[in-house]
Amino acid sequence: MNANLQVSSSQYNDKGNLLLRLEEAQHRLGYLSEQTMGELAESLGISVSEVYGVATFYSFLSTRPQGKYVLRVCKGLPCCLKDSHMVISAIEAAIGIRPGDTTPDGKFSLELTNCIGACDSAPAMLVNSELHVGLTSRRISRILKTYE
Ligand code: FES
């Protein structure tokens, strides 16, 4: 076996520990700042770039401050086939931001995410941890109003 491909069990534990620590930090602080990622890297004895790589890989982690309500529109294939682009356009029209942005008042952030496990009711999105399925332009408008 190629020595470069061998990964010790402690490396797996470090990676799992890193993800748990990132999730905990985001839950506590709202997002992962450069300072937070630097402190995590130092405490785990790994590089900041490795921490940043994991923090930016997972769509549920954010390196930017997020709005009070984070809209995560699924971009998985079943949702695309059920017109998730309409969902994104309807949200953009309703609150005036594009994916990756936050409204100036800090109320909403819009993100795209991979499958959220609701393919049978596509298109789907999460608002924070609340799942919304079978989305239409009209439903999106009503849903957004419930978060006013
Ligand atoms: S692909 Fe959208 S919920 Fe699975």
Image (cartoon, rainbow, N blue to C red):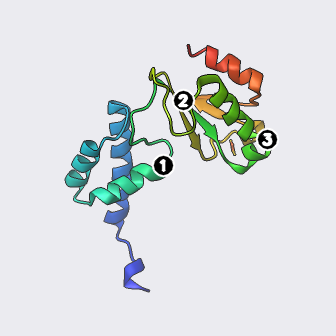
Badge 1, how many Cα within 10 Å: few under 14, some, many 20+? few
Image: 146 above or below 51: above
In the rendered structure, the answer to whether residue 116 lies left or right of residue 104 reads right
Label 3 sits on what residue type? Lys
The residue to which callout 1 is attached is 58
Q: Residue furthest toward the right?
A: 82
Please identify the quarter of the rendering in which residue 34 is found: top left
Mark 1–mark 3 CB contact (< 8 Å)? no
In the rendered structure, the answer to whether residue 70 lies left or right of residue 94 reads left
Mark 3–mark 2 CB contact (< 8 Å)? no
In the rendered structure, the answer to whether residue 92 lies left or right of residue 28 reads right
Q: Which comes before the other along the chain, label 2 or label 1?
A: 1
Residue 11, image x, y percentages: 33, 64
Badge 2, how many Cα within 10 Å: few under 14, some, many 20+? few
Label 1 sits on what residue type? Tyr
Residue 55, image x, y percentages: 40, 49
Q: Which quarter holds ligand 1? A: top right
The residue to which callout 3 is attached is 82
Q: Mark 3 vs mark 2: give the one in front.
A: 3
Q: Residue at coordinates 61% horizontally, 47% vertically from top-left?
A: 114
Give the spatial CA distance, label 1 vs label 3: 24 Å
Residue 143, image x, y percentages: 66, 19
Give the spatial CA distance, label 2 vs label 1: 15 Å
Residues 50 and 101: in front is 101
Q: Mark number for residue 124?
A: none
Q: Residue at coordinates 20% horizontally, 51% vertically from top-left?
A: 43
Q: Secondary structure at mark 2?
A: loop
Badge 3, how many Cα within 10 Å: few under 14, some, many 20+? some
Q: Mark number for residue 129?
A: 2
